[in-house]
Amino acid sequence: MNHERILKMKKGKMITGIGLVLILGIGEVLLPGCSSKTQINWQTAKVGRHSMSNAVTATGTVEPVTQVEVGTQVSGIVDKIYVDYNSVVEKGQLIAEMDKVTLQAELESQEAQLANAKAEYEYREKNYRRNKILYEEKLISDTDFETAEYEYLKAKSTYEKSLADIVKVRRNLGYAVITSPIDGVVISREVEEGQTVAAGFETPTLFTIAKDLTEMQVIADVDEADIGQIREGQRVTFEVDAYRNDVFEGKVTQVRLEATVESNVVTYEVVVSAPNPDLKLKPGLTATITIYTLEKENVLTIPPKALKFVPDRALAEADGFTLQPVTVENTALQKTVWVRNGQHLQEKEIQTGTSTASHLEITGGLTEGDEVLLGMEMPGKNAIPMGPQGGGETNPFMPPRPGQKKK
């Protein structure tokens, strides 16, 4: 009997234990706030000091800073060429000569015309002066005096025209001697000896001379979406395919206002200085440039998404947290973040500076080491959406989350 009684007592205790376990399990599922375990996983970031940078990329062409096209203003045959590609020249140095035979003949003909016009002018001038004296003495008629005056003025005009014509012919003869206008290097030669050039409608280019290849520039095409960030003096790095392991540096020296439209794409030219002391950079190379529009060192920052997060008050309080929101009325310009200190969550108003995709500069309201909230999630659930109202956008046809009032 005692044995059976003992078995019944053990069986009753076992049933009671199982029942308690089931009750506790159901209570934990239905009443998560009653659990002593932390149910919320907080996504946080500490306020720290970082370097901030932002950049714009573009492509461009390496060009000499000063580049002069040398041509000729007279038509004719290129008689002599004294320089070639890559020749180093000085200002005033003879680099080519045009055939002078025709130009010399024109000069001699014009000199003869000038001598004839001068003789005619001097004769008419003397005749006019004699007739003037006779006219004043009433010894010749008005017609004779007027005729002498007319012939004199006509001869004077012809003589002055001949003087102007001979200046032009002498200048053209001078143009047959082509000299370098600057100190530099010949980077292009467009003609050969014996070639005929015509300067009737436009000046033909014979040579292209670059002034100083140790100082180059990159002319880059920047998209209209990025041009608003570009300023003179910003640091630039660029690479060229000819030297894949080298990174060249320069600065923005000019942002040109003229827009270029190609295939409905609007771009603006940006000039970048490119020091070239070792002469690696060649005119015409394609450069891929990076313009640093923002560079700050050792600034206080937080992730930008901290501005968008607002904790779910009901869930946080159910998990034992106390919340202290900003007491002043929110305005459109006010910026706040939530800071965690143990079981206490405090909303703080902050002042911000510049921002990038990963960093937001803090100029006031936070101190280094503060722990700001970025998000919250429940075990086994996705993170609570972040938005200006702590829940992001809500669907009116979906039921609200626990602790959230339906809008």
Image: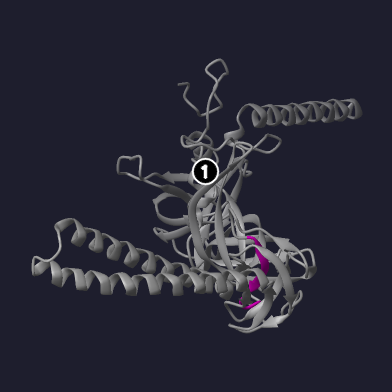
Q: x, y percentage for residue 192?
A: 78, 68
User: Which residue is situated farthest in the top direction here?
Assistant: 397
Q: Which residue appears at 56% of the width and 15% of the height?
A: 397
Q: Amino acid at mark 1?
A: Gly
Q: Residues within 10 Å of mark 1 (few under 14, many from 20)?
A: some
Q: Which residue appears at 38% of the width and 64% of the height?
A: 158
Q: Which residue appears at 45% of the width and 49% of the height?
A: 337
Residue nearer the viewer, 371 or 112: 112
User: Which residue is situated farthest in the left direction here?
Assistant: 137
Decide: is 205 above or below 27: below
Direction from residue 333 to residue 183 in the image, left or right: right
The region drawn magenta spans: 204-214
Quadrant assignment, res 287? bottom right
Direction from residue 288 to residue 313 in the image, left or right: left
Residue nearer the viewer, 289 or 38: 289
Q: Is residue 206 magenta?
A: yes
Q: Which residue appears at 52% of the width and 43% of the height?
A: 320
Quadrant assignment, res 14? top right
Decide: is 198 above or below 124: above
Q: x, y percentage for residue 345?
A: 47, 48
Number of marks present in the image shown: 1
- For the N terminus, the image quarter is top right
Q: Is residue 289 visible?
A: yes
Residue nearer the viewer, 86 or 13: 86
Q: Secondary structure at mark 1?
A: loop
Q: Is residue 328 magenta?
A: no
Quadrant assignment, res 90? bottom right
Direction from residue 299 to residue 125 in the image, left or right: left
Direction from residue 393 to residue 15 in the image, left or right: right
The residue that mark 1 highlights is: 320
- For the C terminus, the image quarter is top left
Q: x, y percentage for residue 73?
A: 58, 65
